Amino acid sequence: MLLACFITLLITMPRLCAQSSQLSFKEAGELRKNFVEYGKKYIGCPYVSGATGPVSFDCSGFVYAVSRESIGYQIPRVVKNIYKFCTIIDESQREPGDLVFFKTTSSPEPSHIGIYIGNGQFLNCASDGPNTGVILSSLNENYWKTRYYKTGRFLPSSNSPEQTGALA
């Protein structure tokens, strides 16, 4: 049984990767919307270190599980590896479905992650503070503003060159 699952994964993974690079801007937008909306269903789930759901999560376990379950994308499991997996983009290019990274420890690498949902807001699974577990937070909150690190992208952009004003 385990071998059959592994073989299925090997067969479908290249197809998923190939399809993602061939998506229209509209399809990419739908993919991003599904990713964000699926993440919202976990608001209120508690934080548990090392957990990947479905009833509790840590910050990277939340992003990992939502990506896998909602859109079938297998991303790395821990924050620093997800960061390395992403393409780092300027915050002016940020779209719903991109990932936001934070430095919440003294480590030189990012230590916290969330799913950007638009309008300066992101979903994340917080381990401490007045609200813990899967919550909706704002990049404008003083805590997150002072710890924001970078934005990463692993999904195709939903913005066409015409929408962004970029040259073809």
Image (cartoon, helix red, strand yellow):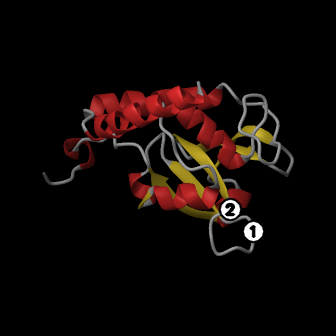
Helix, strand or loop under label 2: loop
**Measured along the vertical axis of the image, is residue 88 above or below residue 44?**
below
Quadrant of image for the N terminus: top right
**Measured along the vertical axis of the image, is residue 7 above or below residue 143?**
above
Q: Considering depth in this image, is 47 or 128 the residue closer to the camera?
A: 47
Expressed as whole percent of the image width and height from the top left, the position of residue 52 reads 71, 38
Label 2: few (<14), some (14–19) or many (≥20) C-alpha neighbours in 10 Å: many
Give the amino acid type for the residue marked by disc 1 in the picture.
Thr
Q: How far apart are marks 2 and 1 (CA)?
A: 7 Å
User: What residue lies at 85% left-to-right and 51% top-to-bottom?
Assistant: 129
Query: In the picture, residue 7 is in which quadrant?
Result: top left
User: What residue lies at 41% left-to-right and 30% top-to-bottom?
Assistant: 31
Chain-order first, disc 2 or disc 1: 1
Tags 2 and 1 touching, CB below 8 Å: yes
- The residue wearing badge 2 is 111
Q: Considering depth in this image, is 11 or 76 the residue closer to the camera?
A: 11
**Measured along the vertical axis of the image, is residue 134 above or below residue 1?**
below
Residue 45: in sight, yes or no? yes
- The residue wearing badge 1 is 105
Query: In the picture, residue 2 is in which quadrant?
Result: top right
Label 1: few (<14), some (14–19) or many (≥20) C-alpha neighbours in 10 Å: few
User: What residue lies at 57% left-to-right and 43% top-to-bottom?
Assistant: 115
Q: In this view, does 80 lie to the left or right of 104?
A: left
Expressed as whole percent of the image width and height from the top left, the position of residue 137 reads 68, 44
Q: Is residue 63 left or right of residue 22?
A: right
Helix, strand or loop under label 1: loop
Q: Is residue 78 left or right of residue 44?
A: left
Residue 36: in sight, yes or no? no
Expressed as whole percent of the image width and height from the top left, the position of residue 125 reads 73, 43
